[in-house]
Image (cartoon, grey):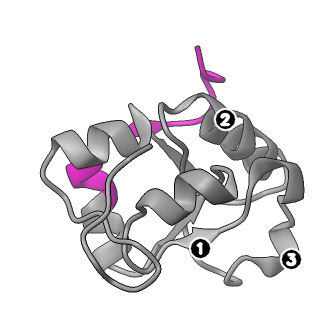
Amino acid sequence: MNDAAVPEISPHEASELVRRGAALLDVREDSEWDAGHAEGAVHMPLAQLDPLRLPAGHRVVAVCRSGNRSGQAAAWLRAEGYDVHNLEGGMAAWERAGLQVVTNTGAPGHVA
């Protein structure tokens, strides 16, 4: 269960926030990212999370495969003063919702 202070949002709500300028922060490991990620996401594995590398002044939507690691990242970022949401169900839910998943080359990807 994720920290209650971190709001969770659905894949479609997350997609809308990103469309309106929020940063989508993917905290999965390199192999997971390489298999498929949301186009335009910022990749920063949880162990390498550095808020200074995030776009300043932007709302953040944190995502991992299932929502657990991103919940940890979101709780930490919220404690640091960021306006952050956790993507409920992670990239697995994003993919199930029919939202685009791509590889680094832009080809269709999948959630590993």
Asked if residue 1 is positioned above or below residue 50 in the image, the reply reads above
The residue drawn where x is 34% and y is 38% is 92
Secondary structure beneath label 3 = helix
Q: Amino acid at mark 1?
A: Val
Q: Residue at x 41, y 61 (%)?
A: 36
Q: Which mark is residue 103?
A: none
Magenta segment includes 65: no
User: Nearer the N terminus, badge 2 or badge 3?
Assistant: 3
Residue 25: name its quadrant.
bottom right
Amino acid type indicated by mark 3: Leu
Give the percent coordinates (x, y) of residue 70.
62, 41
Q: Is residue 88 visible?
A: no
Q: Which range of residues does the magenta coloring cover?
A: 1-14
Cα separation between marks 2 and 3: 19 Å
Crowding at dot 1, Cα within 10 Å, few <14 / some 14-19 / many 20+, comes out as some
Residue corresponding to mark 2? 69
Q: Quadrant of residue 102?
A: bottom left
Query: Which residue bears the numbered disc 1?
Result: 42
Q: Which residue is mark 3?
A: 52
Query: Which element carries disc 1, helix, strand or loop?
Result: strand
Q: Nearer the viewer, residue 66 or 86?
A: 66
Q: Is residue 88 left or right of residue 30?
A: left
Task: Identify whether 36 is placed above or below 32.
Answer: below
How crowded is the residue under tag 3: few (<14 C-alpha within 10 Å), some, or many (20+)? few
**Which element is circle 2 on?**
helix
In which quadrant will I find the C terminus? top left
Gap in Å between the C-alphas at discs 3 and 1?
A: 13 Å
Mark nearer the N terminus (3 vs 1): 1
Q: Nearer the viewer, residue 104 or 81?
A: 104
Residue 83 location in percent, x, y? 61, 58
Could you tell whether 71 is left or right of 73 in the image? left
Which of the image's four quarters has the N terminus? Answer: top right
